[in-house]
Every structure is written in C-alpha cells, then in structure tokens.
Image: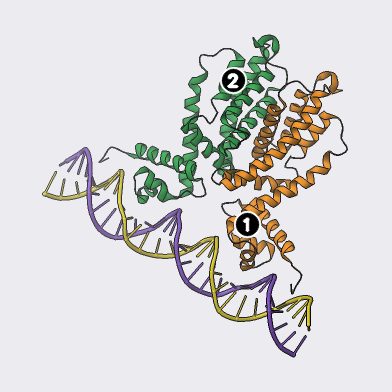
Chain colours: A green, B orange, C yellow, D purple
DNA sequence: ACCATGTTTGACTGACGCGTCAGATCTGAC
DNA sequence: GTCAGATCTGACGCGTCAGTCAAACATGGT
C-alpha cells in the first residue's frame, strides 16, 4: 500500500455528518450535497466511500446503533438494585442531550424506512432484540429477588420498550403535553408501579 | 352555480387514494402521479383540488384522523365495566385490518414529518389530546369505582398511549418479535396489571 | 525522479417529478 | 341552441439531485 488508509476516519466523518443532517432536516429532505457541505468534503468523495445514498443511510443507521450500545453499556455497571437499574436504563434513553436527540431522529427515520425495506427490518430486529434481552434480564432478576410485581418479563419488557419509543416520538415532535420532563416522570412512575411497595424504600 | 359541486366527492376520492399510496409506498416515495393513477384521475385534477403535494398530505392526515375518530366513537357505547372499556379502547387501535393498517402507516408518516413541520405538530397535538382525554376519563372512572390501581391517570394514560404507538410501529415493521397477536396480548396483559385483582373476576 | 496506488474534486448528465397551462369537455340555466 | 362557469386533461417546463467521470493531487516506495 502506498499510503496509510484514511478510510476509517473519513467514513466516521461522513457518517457523523449524515446523522447530523438527518436530525436537522429529516431523512426525506437529506441530500448528499448537505452531507458533503456539513463534513467539509466534496460530494464526489462521499460517493467514493458509499456507492449510493441508500448505502450511506444504512451505514449511518448501523453506525449510530453501535455507538449508542457502547455508550450505554458502561452506565449500568455499578448499580445493583433492580429498581434502580431499570430506572437508569430507561433514563439512558431519554432524548436529553444533542447526541441522544440526534440518535432518536435517526431511529425514527429508520422505523419509517424499515416499513418498506426488509434490510432495515433486519437491523431493527437485531437492535430491538438486544435491547429486549437486556431489559428482560433486569426484570427477571428483580422478580426473582422479590422486588418487582409478577408477570411475564417478556411482556413487561415489550410494554416498557414500546412505551419509551412512543414517548420519545412525542418529545421529538415538541408536543406540549409530552415534554422531556414529563417523559422522565412517566418512566419513573411506571417503574414505581412495577416495584413492590415493600421493597421500594 | 351552473353545476352541482362534485368537490366533496372528488376530494374524498383523492384523499382515499393518497392514504392507500402512502400506506403502500411510504410518504417519501409517494408521487402525485401515483395518486392520480390509483384514483383514476389525471394529475392535473389533483392539483385542481390541492395546490401542492404538501397540501394534499396535510389534508390526508386530517381526513384520516377524522375518519378514525368517527369509527371509534361507536365502539364503546355499550360497555360499562371500566376494565372492559379500556381493553376495548386499546383493541380498537390494533392494526388488525387493512383500513387500520393504512391509518397507522399514515400516522407514522405524520410523526416523522411533524418533527420538522409545526403545522403537523398542531394536528398531532389535537389528536393526541383527544385520545388522551378519552382514555384518562376511563381510567379515572375505573379508579373511582375501585377497579384500577391508584396512580396519576394522566401519567397512566400517557404510558398506555405511548405503548400502543410503539407496539404498532413494531407490528408495521413486520417484526418477528412483535406480531399482531403479541401486541394484543401485551395490551391485555397491561390492562390486567392495572386492574385490581379483587375486581378482575 | 518516477511510479503505483489511494484519494479528492466539482462539473456534468440524465432521470425524475411537481406544478403549469392552454385548451377540451361537461352541465344546467335561460 | 347557446352561454357561463365548473371541471378535467396530459403534455410540457423547469428545478432538483443522485451518481459519474476524467483529471488532478498526495503519499510512500524504489
């Protein structure tokens, strides 16, 4: 090889710009030229690393997900109490800072695209599955230790995850009846509901 | 007027075709020409009734919502038991037939568009508000009659509605881990969780 | 110096699709 | 029958944008 490869760095640069543009303008309105402008790179170079706009989007979705997972893993390490673990896990999804908001934007775009694209459905399946496994484990553990109400952990997990998704959408839409604070309160309230009174203190 | 107005009929025809096309191809891929083809009307006529593609979409969103509300109102009339009322209300949102599926498609498109369009945010606000009021009333009533667990009815309502939204998205995406049946079971399971044991039988 | 290879550029092309428009057609009133 | 106004048509103009390409540039090896 004549030169050290800049590919990894350049791809990251492009994907980050993509996420930013999608978050700001939405997937539909995103243009390759926008990504080029935001990353300070010519449109030709974008196509040098990603054949089509669709490839670019798919890569951005995947990259965004991997980033999120990595960031989240560290959060739960030190917490033992199941109720607190669950609370913290839900809190980690709140669209509370710019990065998380951008991620949610991307995630919503993914959903709508995935409805008509099997490739993206696979990605959703993978992400949703991992998410579900982690949360179900916390709930199952809490039930075994007598801290949570009874009930199928998988059912509870699906209910919680879907709730978070639905809440986040409303927050992203700047709904007056669903602000970030209200979303936080709703998540906490539901955890309270699942936590057994005797063990709550 | 020289002729009886066909406007109402024609608009309905166009809006119905719009919903159908959006459900099939997604909002991004929808073309005015598609709507023309599906409704058996020339593209010129579409623009005769709707100035721009955006106007058409907005009208379709609004029309779809009004239709849904009307259909739903009748469902709850004969039911008295709060638990059953809640169960039935949630069930009425299941993407269980073609019409409901199309409505959900439109609804998801609305969300993603609304993130970047204040006009649509207003529509969401209105719909979400009405939905919320109806469900909160059922929950409050059930609590007064001692059939539901305690807890802020508004908080519970937001949790339930968001859950339904999130579940529906996964169903629309043909998720293997969230089928229509599973969504139904999840809704029922959560109603069970909110219903007091003594009153459940 | 020169080459091979990796990288970058931005002007260009070709397809695509919204919205226009000039005229055709239909309907009821008189 | 004729007229006014409503309705309808489909070809076309025009801007937009993904993707191409030929040429330029950079870098490290020899």
* Nearer-the-camera pick, B140 or A26: B140
Mark 1 burial class by Cα count in 10 Å: few <14, some 14-19, many 20+:
many
Front position among marks 2 and 1: 1
Q: Which mark is residue B32?
A: none
x then y, percent, for residue A4: 28, 37
Residue B148 is situated, as x and y percent measured from the top left of the image, at 79, 23
B36 to A164, vertically: above or below: below
Q: Chain of mark 2?
A: A
Q: Position of residue B39 (x, y in %)?
A: 69, 63
A1 w.r.t. A154: above or below: below
For the residues beneath circles 2 and 1, the answer to whether they share a chain is: no
Instruction: Rate crowding at label 2 as few (under 14), some (14 to 19) or many (20 or more) other CA atoms within 10 Å.
Output: some
Q: Residue at x 65, y 26 (%)?
A: A157
Q: Which residue is mark 1?
A: B56
SS for callout 1? helix
Closer to the camera, B133 or A186? B133
- Name the residue at 35% across, 48% down: A45
Task: Report the front residue among A139 and B166.
Answer: B166
Residue drawn at x 61%, y 52% as measured from the top left: B25
Can residue A71 be seen? Answer: yes
Judged left or right of residue A19, residue A3 is: left
SS at circle 2: helix
The C terminus of chain A appears in which quarter of the rendering? top right
Image quadrant where residue C25 sits: bottom right
Whether residue A46 sits left or right of residue B114 in the image: it is left
Q: Quadrant of the N terminus of chain A?
A: top left
x and y, in percent, of residue A6 in the image: 32, 39
Q: Viewer-proximal residue, C25 or B125?
A: B125
* CA distance for labels 2 and 1: 43 Å
Above or below, B145 relative to A52: above
Q: Are marks 2 and 1 in contact (CB under 8 Å)?
A: no
Residue position for label 2: A87
């Amino acid at each position: 090889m004549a030169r050290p490869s800049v590919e990894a760095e350049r791809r990251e640069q492009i994907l980050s710009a993509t996420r930013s543009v999608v978050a700001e303008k939405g997937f539909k309105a995103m243009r390759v030229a926008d990504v080029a402008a935001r990353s300070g790179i010519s449109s030709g170079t974008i196509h040098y690393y990603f054949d089509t706009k669709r490839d670019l989007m798919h890569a951005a979705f995947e990259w965004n997900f991997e980033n999120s997972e990595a960031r989240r893993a560290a959060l739960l390490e030190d917490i033992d109490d199941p109720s607190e673990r669950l609370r913290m896990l839900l809190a980690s999804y709140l669209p509370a800072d710019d990065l998380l908001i951008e991620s949610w934007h991307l995630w919503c775009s993914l959903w709508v695209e995935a409805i008509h694209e099997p490739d993206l459905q696979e990605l959703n399946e993978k992400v949703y599955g991992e998410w579900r496994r982690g949360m179900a484990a916390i709930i199952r553990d809490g039930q075994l230790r007598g801290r949570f109400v009874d009930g199928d952990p998988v059912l509870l997990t699906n209910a919680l995850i879907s709730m978070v998704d639905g809440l986040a959408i409303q927050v992203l839409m700047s709904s007056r009846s669903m602000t970030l604070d209200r979303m936080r309160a709703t998540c906490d309230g539901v955890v309270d509901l699942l936590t057994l009174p005797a063990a709550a203190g």
